[in-house]
Each structure stands twice: as structure tokens, then as C-alpha cells.
Image (cartoon, helix red, strand yellow):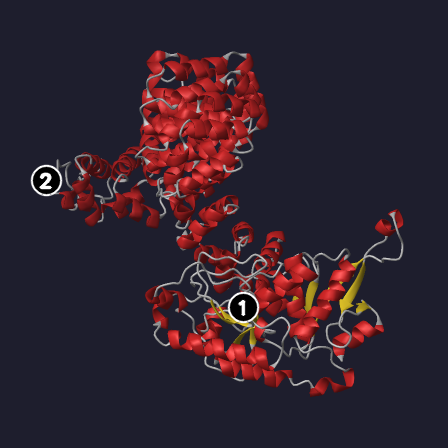
Amino acid sequence: MGKKVKKEVEPPPKDVFDPLLIESKTAATVVLMLSSPEEEVLAKACDALYKFASKGDENKMTLLGLGAVEHLYKLISHEDPIVRRNAIMVFGIMASNHDVKKLLRELDVTNSLISQLALEEDVVIHEFATLCLAHMAVEYTTKVQIFEQGGLEPLIRLLSSPDPDVKKNSVECIYLLVQDFQSRAAVRALNVIPPLLELLKSEYPVIQLLALKTLEVISKDRETRIILGENKGLDCLLKILETNEFSDLHVEALAVLGNCLEDVCTLQLIQQTGGLKKLLSLVGVSAVPDIQKNAAKAITKAAYDCENRKILNEEEVEKCLINLLEIDNDGVKIAAAQAISAMCENLASKRAFGLQGIPQLVHLLSSDNEEVKEAAVTALANLTAASPSNASAVAEAEGIEPLVNTLNAQREGAIANAATVLTNLATQEPFRINIQSCGVMSVLAKPLRSTSSQVQSKAAFAVAAFGCDADARTELRNAGGLGPLVELLYSKDEEVRRNACWAVMVCASDELTAVELCRLRALDILEEINLSTGRKNNFSEAALEKLLDNNLSQKYSQMGYLSSSNIITDGFYDYGQIKPGVKFLSLEELSMQELTDRQAVIFINAKPQEDLAVEEKAQDSSYEQTILSPSISRKGSREKASSMVSPMEEKQELSGQQCSLSKSGTREKGLRKGKGKKEEEKSKEVTQITSKVQDEIHLENLHWLPPPDFILLDYINDVSQTILPLTSTREQVVALAQFVADKMGGPIERDKLHDFSWELHISEIQFELKCNVVPIGKVKKGTFYHRALLFKVIADRIGVGCSLVRGEYNRAWNEVKLVDDSPQGVARLLLPPQEYIVDLMFEPGFLIKQGSAEADQYKHI
């Protein structure tokens, strides 16, 4: 028999417990449980953390501080589906916290989340993975990560998920991603349009809204709009707009439609199906400001295309927009005005708005809302451009004063467009005068100082428009507007610089303004501009020429040439050839300088001083002394004052002069038939008499005025009586040359020119006057440049055309154009004029043909 062996049972391992139910009331303990190797513990811990995090942001921060995010990150790829699902649920709920999102970005969780979007995954995983991605996609860097890691394709696929939460989270994430242009192109290639249109049928408004918002973003691209049209997307949008119960979606639907209307084909399609008429009708009856505003914005986008403008005009969109201007909502008014601006490119629309919309737009200029004001004035600027009838409508609507006031607006666009409208109105003289009466030039001084190139340009352009009026130029000058205008010449902006040059050219039309512009260095700046091929323009060259033409003293000093059209008037002075970079001083500044050995400044002033009284006393038949009165003028011959002035008046009238010459205050009169000693004696006697009066005058308290040159006045009177009546220009030129030479020392023999001591004579006059400024009538021994200047001055007064040219070494000469006298009748009239140099030194009256050897010799000897 065999022996039985008893089998022993082995005891269980000592380290194995029976199943335990663990409960914890502290988050820290639960977080520690995330390190457990048991799936059931992990799943329950994640479930507990989900409930804890759902209670508020403070709990999420607690878990973040306990390191829960790092543990959960390891679990979202766990092999157990329940653990993975619960971990992702915690992630989804915690990702709404900013600090959690930051840590999730650092951990680069997007790739792991995207991997959970596979179709075979649980719908709950889809829900919370997309929720987490939607929270994170708010940040630009995460958008890039999701795009680069291929997240768009599974997100688009999940738009067709049976779960509404998955749809909502997916479309929201896509909406955030397509803010970037790369994603917009990608979703188009992934055929996102059909599922988005399908979402518009959802029973959940939030999903419909997100779908519309996404469509609004991606339909900014033309290719997407084409696909939208091919998928009957326009019908879906119009159906939403027609359905009252979808009124909460109308604003977004209009935004999408507005993008679609940019395409001509789309707009034509909508028009043909009656959709455009329905749209405008909807806007007309709607009382929702956002709908009205978005409709106006849609029209604005469409109106950027000329064909679209024609279609909109056919549907009488103008009436709709004009009605929107009346809506009591600033946003609607702004959008409507902007749409009007865009539609103005269509001439028919511009006429329609001009008939009805201008009064409403003018009314909006008084709005307290600066954006409304800017939109309204921009529309007016477009309406009045090249439209005299609309400009008249603005004036008839009493828009001039509010437009001038708008130049003080806060927004740069409002100021610039107000200046544009006023410029458009200024093309019609009655309106220009009306605008000027509102002090527009004074107001424009401020915009000229703006830092905005747009404002600077339009303000300068407006100055050019109004500067054609002398009173307007004076107003701008008095308002200090010339300084900032000149500063604009430095602008690097081509349009600003061009308009500033134009304005300077217009403002330089009178001498006072031209002199002030030169004082502000406009001349120097324009010269610099014209030396630069990149900066100069047609207006810069014209401005320089105009500036010099109205400041002949500086023109002659800088350019050494005055044409026959440059008429020398009282106040002109020959400063001599000025060197580059040297400041050109005024006559007043020169008169205040101490006597120096520099070349005398010869000035012209044949007009009696307006502030002097006349007192004439006949001493004998060959001598008379005159003190001028403001009421006395000279017309060819001397007139005596009818009454004496009081001593006090005499003091005031004779004051203000800064050199001894100006202290004379009396008329220095030489006898027509006598020369030399007798004339000098009379001059000295006059000086002695007036110096006694001048001693009592306080010069520094009165405005400086150049003293009159009565000798020059007598020259002009004599020439007017003796030379002007001559029948031919040639005779006048010859006689005037002889007259000038006779007054300035007579003819000089060529070989004795160096003995003609004119320098000593001029120095004596300077010493006598104790001043460097010398009236030309005082010069009795004059050389080339004295005689040429006197010839030009008198020739200009009697209408004989001649130029004045400065040469080197004190040379100057006059050039005249004369027709040969030998042929008679019609033949003479057909001959071209010949140019001659007038000899004033050697053979006074001899005409030297320009270009000949004699002419070169006269210029350079």
C-alpha cells in the first residue's frame, strides 16, 4: 500500500490587504493618491479633484499649488480609459484659470490633448479635451502649437459629433484659431464650411452664434466667400435674417453677409434673388441699433467696389442710409456716415445724398461725440469733392460756421476733413468770403502746428485756398500762422511739403507777407529743397520765385537780377551781393547799425512819409523848406500845406527815425537851374533846421519808418513831364539814360574811370547822415550800380520795361528790348525785338547790342 502524503496550504503574502474604502477631506491627500499604482484609486482621486475644482477658482489655485497639474499631465495618457477620462475632465475644468493655462503651456499638453480627439475615444474625453483646448487657444502661442501639431482636422471632424458640448467646444476652439490668417487658409482647405452651415440649424443658440462668428472671420477671405456661396450659405444667412425668432443672431448674420457683399458676383446673386431688397427692408423696420449698424457696415464694405456701388444705387440704398442718420444712436450714425462716404464715389449716389443727406450731416457736426463729428465731416468732404452743387448745399444748410468750429475738434480726422470741406467750398467766391469772415485763417494756425501729417497737409492746402485774399493773408500773419507754415517745409512727408510750398507761394503774393516769410527763413528752406532732386516739386520752385518777386530787395541781393516785370517800389534797397548763409537784414535793422566802412545800402522811397506834417516857408524865390503832412500827396508838382502843424504834432510826426538822414524830416530841394554849391548850401540849411526839432524827439518809442527821398521824387516828376511824352520807347530810353547820367556825375571817359572818386562821395554822405543807409537821391556821383538802379526805378515809374543785372566789381547794367525803327508799317511790327544794354557811364544813351563785344566790354571793364 502506498503511503498518503498530506498537502499543506500556503498563507497569503503579508503585504497584501483586503479591499479598503478610503475617504479623505483634504485636497493634499487626494493629490498624493494620484501617485497610486492602482487604476481604481487613480480614477476615484481624479473624480474627487474634478468635483473639488468645479467649485471655484480658489480651489483650482489650491490644486495648482499642491502640484496636481503635473500628476494629471502624466495621467491623460494613461492606458486605463477611465483614469484617462477622469484626468482629462480635471484638466478641462482647471484650464479656465490663467495660472493653470500658463503651466499647461510650459508642459506642452496640446499634443497629448489632440491625440485624445480620435473618433474611437469616449465622448466625455472629446468634450473635456476640446474644452481644455478652447480655454488654451485664447493665447497666441497655443494657437500656433495647435495649428502646427495638426489640431484643426480633428476639431473640424468633431463639429459633426452627436454631443452638443463637443460641438460647442470644437467650434469655439476653431473660432479662436481662425483669428490667425494661417488657420483661416487651413480650415478652408479642410472644408470647414459645410459643417459650420450645418451648425446654424442647431437647437442651441450658443452653437449657432459661435458658428456665425467663425463664418464672419473666415469669410473675410475671398476664396472662402466663393465656397460659402457654392454651399448655399447666403440662403442660410438670409433665412436667419427673415426669421424673427432668430433675432438674437441677426447682428452676426449681417456681419457675415457684409463680408459676402464685397464680391460683385455675390451681390448680383443676392440682388437677383431679391435678398438685397429684403436686407434693406429689414434695416428700415428694425429697431435694434446693432442690426442697423452692422447693415451700414455691410453696405460700406460692398461700396468699396465700383460695380457694387452701381447695384446698391439701383436699389436706392441712399434712402436707407439717410434714414439711419436720424437714428438716436451714435454707433448707427457713425456707420451710416461711413457708408455715405464710401457710396460718394458713385456720382448718382453723390447727387442723391446732396439733395437730402447734407442737412443731417451738417447737424451732426454739433454732436458731443467726437467720432460722430469725424464721420459726418468725412462724409461731407467726400460729398463736396468736385461737386459745386453739394458745396452750395452745405452752405445753404448753414454749415460754414460749424465747419470752422470743427477745426478745433479733438480727433485728427475731423480736423483734416473739416479743412478739406472748407477748401472745397472756397472754390466759389461767395462762400470763400463767408468762410473768411468767420476767421478761418486764425483758426487754421492751430492745425498747422499739429503733429499729424494728415492734418498738416489739409491745413496747408486750406491756407493755399484762402490765401488768395489779402485780408486773409493779413489775418494768418497776425495769428502767427506763418511760422508753423514755414516749419512744414521741413516735413519729410511729400504731400505735406508740397502743400506747404503751395501755401507759401500763395501767401507770398503781397510784400508784407513775403518779407515776413523771408524773415522766418522760408527763402533759405526753399532753396535747400530745390537743390534736392528728391524733395523739390513744382510748387517749391514757384514758391521761391513768388517769394522773391514780392521781396525784390532780397531777390536782387541773392540773385543779382530783376526782370522787367519786377517793378521796384518804395521801400526797395540794394543791400549788395549777399553771401550764402548770411542773414538778410531789414532796412530798419540796417538803419540802426553803427556807421561802418561797409558799402552803403542804397534805398528807394519816393513817397512822402505819411506820418509827417507839411510846413512850407518861402525864404526867397530860389529856396523853400517843406515839412510834410499826412493829408498832402504829390502828383507831379509840389503842393503847399494849407496850415501849420502844432509843435506837439510836429514832434510826433518827425520821430521814429534811426539815422541822421531820417532826422531831416524836410524836403531837400535843389534848384532845377542851379547845381553845385547852391544845392549843397540848401541841403545843409535844411538839415540844420530839422535837427533842432529832432533833438526833442524820443526816437525809441515810435515805429520806424524810412524817410522820404524828395530828390528822387523830383526826378520822377521831371521825367514824367519831359521824357514820358516822347513818342517812342527808344527815345524814352535814350533820354532817361542821359537824365540819369546827368544826375550822377555826367559821362565819364573810359581812361579816367579810376579818377571818378564816387567812393569818397558816398562815404561823405554816410558820414553826414551817420548811417550806412543812403537814399538814392543823395547820390550825385554814382558809378555803374547806382546809375543802373536809378534808371530801373524811374523806368518802372514811367512804364519803360527794363531789367537790372548785377555784375562783378560794382558793375550793374540795364537791359531793354527794342524794335528796330528803320522798317515802317506792318513790317516793323513783325520784327522781333532786339535786346540792348543801356550805356549810363561813357556815352549815356548809347544802346549796346546784347551779345556783342562792346556789351562784354561794358560788363567787365
Q: Which picture quadrant has residue 386?
A: top right
Circle 2: is it few (<14), some (14-19), or many (20+) Cα within 10 Å?
few
The answer to whether residue 79 is seen in the rendering is yes
**Residue indicated by mark 1:** 709
Residue 829 image label = none
Residue at horizontal 52 percent and vertical 20 percent from the top: 312
Residue 25 image label = 2
Q: Which picture quadrant has residue 117?
A: top left
Q: Is residue 533 above or below residue 754?
A: above
Q: Secondary structure at mark 2?
A: loop
Q: Secondary structure at mark 1?
A: loop
Q: Residue 744, position in %: x, y?
A: 66, 75
Labels 1 & 2 near each other (Cβ < 8 A): no
Q: Residue furthest front?
A: 621
Q: Residue 136, position in %: x, y?
A: 34, 40
Q: Which picture quadrant has residue 558?
A: bottom right
Q: Can you tell which of label 1 and label 2 is closer to the viewer?
A: 1
Circle 1: is it few (<14), some (14-19), or many (20+) Cα within 10 Å?
many
**Side of 725 relative to 779 (left or right):** right
